[in-house]
Image (cartoon, rainbow, N blue to C red):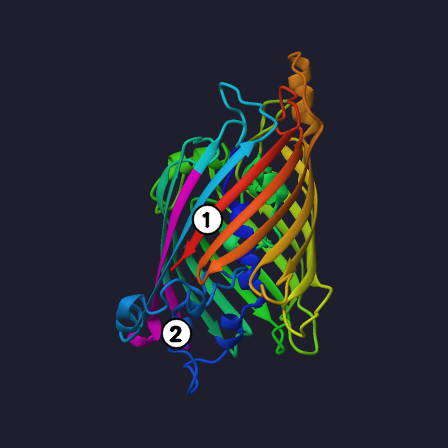
Amino acid sequence: MRSMPYPMKACLVVLAWSGCTAANAASSASPAAPGKPKCMNYDQYLTRAEIVIKPVPICGRISPELGGLREALAEHGLGFTATSFNGYTYDVLGHNAKPQVYNGQNPSYNASLNTYLTYDLTRVGFANDAQFTLAAQWVGANYTPANPRVTTMTVFAINQSFFNHQLELEYGYITGVRLFYGIALGGNASTAALGPSSVVPFQVGMSATEPTPTLNVIVRDPKLRYYNSFAVTRSVSPGGIAQDVEDNPSGFRLSVPNAKALFIDEFGYKRAASASENSAWFRAGALYNTSQYTEFKSGEKSDNNYGMYLAGTLQVSKPWGDARGWYLDSKVDYSPDSVNAINKAIQFTAFNVGPFVNRPTDMLAFGVTKSYYSKELRDVYTGSRMNTADYTLAATASYAAQLTSGIYLISGLTYTHNPVLTPVHGDALLLQESLNFLF
């Protein structure tokens, strides 16, 4: 199963989503008010394509002016950002082996570069706040089953809202994980060894790596708290995420073999932190995939793959009267075990944004995830006289430290019971380090 650098990115995503930083608080006004930093002017050009992620404000990045480049681009309605994630994972219990079967079993390195270019489409006649985003990603790694070497487009989409944001549209190419679920809030402990394939919505066909053609419609109440988000998109290849990458290396393919329509609907409630209210995000989602998957036991084709999830993220303390403090995040997922290798999971995470008064942009997180391997798949292996694990359990602790503006060092330690389905393997203790740069 594949792994992606979600655990290392998760802390940065939470810091941005929670709105805890001084730069984030300042970015609410655009253009910048007199006496405010000039870099606040550029936040209006940050991508809005990634619905479940709030980008880190320009003032919180390395070289907010980029030597005058941001100002020159903004004059033409353009925005540019880039992020670089550089990670290392190793099982300190010394389970080195050839061939390597999980991320970190042998020393595993990965590096990625993500670039975003946005354009204000109102300059060419689009209504309201229409924005186009073009994003691309390069990933390199020494253990390619965990982090395949790819150079791909990741977003080619338009975001547009109507009726004071009560109706929002997203259309183009984008991965489902950027629109639904909120996988990165608090981190997903199991992704350290198993990757996105261990996340039930990805098992059901939600895109995680290569973008899929998508139309997403979001309807909100007048107070912009309750919402319903519905998307018609293309499933990833029934052969899995790795097959999807092989079939669509550029990200621009409209279709890939055997992948058909996927329908996703999420109903939720989302509230930002304020002086009087704690941050909260509760959601329930369902997915239905019309692609044909091969059933583990019968070997027959089935077009009845589906999934459901419940998730909640709640701020439970507010020592400084803002978005800093302790949060609880929990998720429960289910899908049929006839076609999904991991069909059930439960996750609980506690994280603290700004754990120390003099470290307002740091984050401390503790999480536990239990994911269940398909019983039908295990029965097939048992019939072949191969021993299998019933589930995988991962417990993680991590700390994201801001070294300086736009540079984060994220350290993590994850204990994983049953890091692979078969053969049953000894427990792993994964040390994770990541140095991340935001431009």
Crowding at dot 2, Cα within 10 Å, few <14 / some 14-19 / many 20+, comes out as many
Q: Mark 2, mark 1: which one is toward the viewer? A: 1
For this rendering, which residue is in front, 126 or 110? 110
Type of residue at label 2? Cys
Return the residue at label 2: 39
| Pointer 1 local density, CA inside 10 Å: few below 14, some 14–19, many at least 20 | some
Was residue 179 drawn as part of the magenta stretch in this picture? no
- Residue to which mark 1 is pinned: 435
Examine the rendered structure and indicate whether residue 84 appears above or below residue 39: above
- Reply above or below: 134 against 260: below
The spot of residue 171 in percent (x, y) is: 43, 60
- Determine whether 435 is above or below 226 in the image: above
In the figure, is residue 176 to the left or right of 328? left
Residue 322 in view (yes/no):
yes
Q: Percent x, y for residue 349? A: 69, 51
Highlighted magenta segment, given as a residue range: 110-132
- Whole-Å distance between the Cαs marked 2 and 1? 24 Å
190 or 175: nearer the viewer = 190
> Does residue 305 show up?
no
User: Could you tell me which residue is drawn at 45 percent across and 61 percent down?
Assistant: 49
The spot of residue 368 in percent (x, y) is 70, 43
Q: Residue at x 38, y 73 (%)?
A: 42
State which tag comes first along the sequence, 2 or 1: 2
Quadrant location of the N terminus? top right
